[in-house]
Amino acid sequence: MKLEKASGIAVCFLPVVLCVGMVSAAEPEKTGSGEPFDMQEVVVTATAIERKVTDITSAVSVIDSAEIEKSNANYVMDVIGYLPSVYIRRDAIYGRQDIEIRGLGSNLRRIQTLIDGRPEKMSLFGCTVAQTLPLANVERIEVIRGPESVLYGTDAMGGVVNIITRRLLDPGYESSVVLSYGSYETLHGVLRHGGHIGAFDYYITYDRKETDGYRDNSAYNADFLSLRTGYELNDVWRLEFSAQYFDDTARDPGPENAPYTNNDEMAYVRYSWDADLIGKWDNSKFLITIYHNEGEHEFNMPSIDDYWHSKDRTLGVLTYYARDIYEQGNTKDTLTAGYEFKHQWAEPQDDWTTWAQANMPARFMDFGPYERNNHDIFAFNEFTKSRWIQTLGLRGHWDDHAEAWEALPQIGLLCHATEATTARAKIAKGFRQPRFSELHLFPAHNENLNPEEVWSYEVALTHILAPGLSAFVNPFYMNVENFIETVPNDAPPPMTINQNSGEFIIQGIEVGLEVQPVDDLNITVHYTYTDIEDGPADNPNIHREGKPEHVVNAVLGYRIGSIAVSLEGEYVAGLYDSDLLAGGDILKVDDFVVFGLKGTYRAGRNIEVFAGIENLLDENYEQIPGYPMPGTTVSMGVKAQI
């Protein structure tokens, strides 16, 4: 399938955008909050030194605290799902979510996830447990679309999600509580408290979720705690310490036509911390951070005779120095150089290995423990000359499994052609190292796997047509190589084996329009077309699991006095996913359209009442075959500043 074979939606949508103007993907897209469109937001993920989002050569989106508060959402993934090329896959009210960015994700294995710059990954499988990312402590979310391995190393193939947590900047104290109740006995509570006393500041949050679920045996509960502290040593140096803890239990109801009826459940415990020393001068910045991420996962699935229990941890050190090495007139050159060390460890627990030896072909398995050390060095240069910005970066990665260097270059160019028009181009290489589970665990493991690689090419144009009217277009082309897939074994046993694929192409286009005809009305529309090349004849959809071909997101936000209302819609077509009832075959999912309606009423200076209706039209749809999504659900609650 080629790019020009987009559906009628693309054919109708593209001429509108191309006629009104071309726009870059470095725009700070909004999600319909009703706030003015601000092209001067600051982003920190794409470079070490803070830069305006309009000056970044990567495709960057920023969601600020005002939008997060107005969304009344539960998770980080809920609020980024309306961005271009971002698709969120769910199978329940609360619990695990999957994310794809430009057709690469796979439970966040191919997307780098950061909390204040700290990698948030499970070392055994290389995934991020998405439900460990609630919004209770989040100040801002920054999303890079496309490979960014030059600064963030392994996993940054599809993009980067960086979560910036809250801290109290002004002297004093702040406390708040959020309580909500909804369909299926769904409860959600958040407590927050922060303080800033002299040189010391802190912020503490607690988040509790629970629901009976909308299907039998689909109950869920979770607890989340977070802490962020900081101390200003002087005008230059700052010390920070952050930590979080997460614990949840989710019942799995199974496919609708073959439900699980034996209290099948999955339990996650994860905790992480980091300690940072930060120095900032007028023209430079220094950072050294030590971070730790650890977890324990235990699944008990008697309905399908399955069981799992493992522990994993990651310990890392990251340091970099960024400096404006030249500045005169409208010319400036900024250089960033750094080093990162990462030690990864994981081990299936004895109760699982005993079970596996009795129930699986254990002779094909390595039960661990597994360890690996990564060493990365990187340099990134940004040169600005009047309206032109040019970036050039290179990262070298070495680990004691591959015992070879991986070179990860990136080059970008941006031109502010006029005050209203910006052009941008970027070439980048991303990679992902094979994880312990793929190399050593389960019968299909293969210790000779090579790292996955992607070369990405994109161009973008941005144009502000008039006050309150802007649009963008961003085509992209990615050549993916060594994609790790589980395929039939040509020389069994075992019957299947992990193998690196040949090359295949992902290409697509992101377009969007934002209209703000009056101050209190904001309309945002995004369309993404993603074309993924077919796999081999015996499994043509193998590259497409969880990746839709067409996605249209639209958000209308309106405010009148103390009342704010938003109407959100999502259209998904050309989605393929695994069907458990068809033996795990990757089959097409029916197209669907869903709408949500949210409203907020400010009852006083410190009190806000909110309500929401999800799946407003009671659409009968699935994202994962066999797991129907909830029908119309209603929730309401209150936010109070204490």
Image (cartoon, helix red, strand yellow):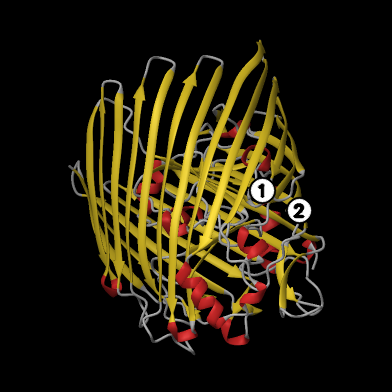
Tell me the CA gap for discs 2 and 1: 9 Å
Q: Quadrant of residue 194?
A: top left
Residue 616 picture quarter: bottom left
Amino acid type, callout 2: Met
Q: Tell me if I can see residue 126 in this picture.
A: yes
Residue at image x 56%, y 67%? 571
* Quarter placement of the N terminus: bottom right
Find residue 259 and report its horizontal and vertical position in percent: 44, 87
How packed mark 1 is, by other alpha carbons closer than 10 Å (few <14, some 14-19, many 20 or more), is many
Place of residue 293 in the rendered image (x, y in percent of width and height, measured from the top left):
47, 48
Rendered position, 341 above or below 380:
below
Q: In this view, does 342 lie to the left or right of 208?
A: right
> Which residue is disc 2 drawn over?
478
Mark 1 lies on a secondary structure that is loop
> Mark 2 packing: few (<14 Cα in 10 Å), some, or many (20+)?
many
Residue drawn at (39%, 87%) of the image: 261
Determine whether 54 is above or below 158 in the image.
above
Q: Do the residues labelled 2 and 1 touch (CB within 8 Å)?
A: yes
Q: Give the residue at mark 1.
A: 146
Q: What percent of the width, then of the height, locates residue 133?
A: 42, 53
Residue 541 position within the rendered picture, expressed as x and y whole percent measured from the top left: 72, 74
Q: Earlier in the sequence, mark 2 or mark 1?
A: 1
Q: Which of 262 and 328 is in front in this view?
A: 262
Residue 44: which numbered mark, if any?
A: none
Left or right, 625 with respect to 263, comes to right
What secondary structure is marked by label 2? Answer: strand
Q: In this view, does 626 lie above or below 238?
A: below
In front here: 9 or 573?
573
- Which image quarter: residue 552? bottom right
Q: What is the three-letter code of the residue carrying label 1?
A: Gly
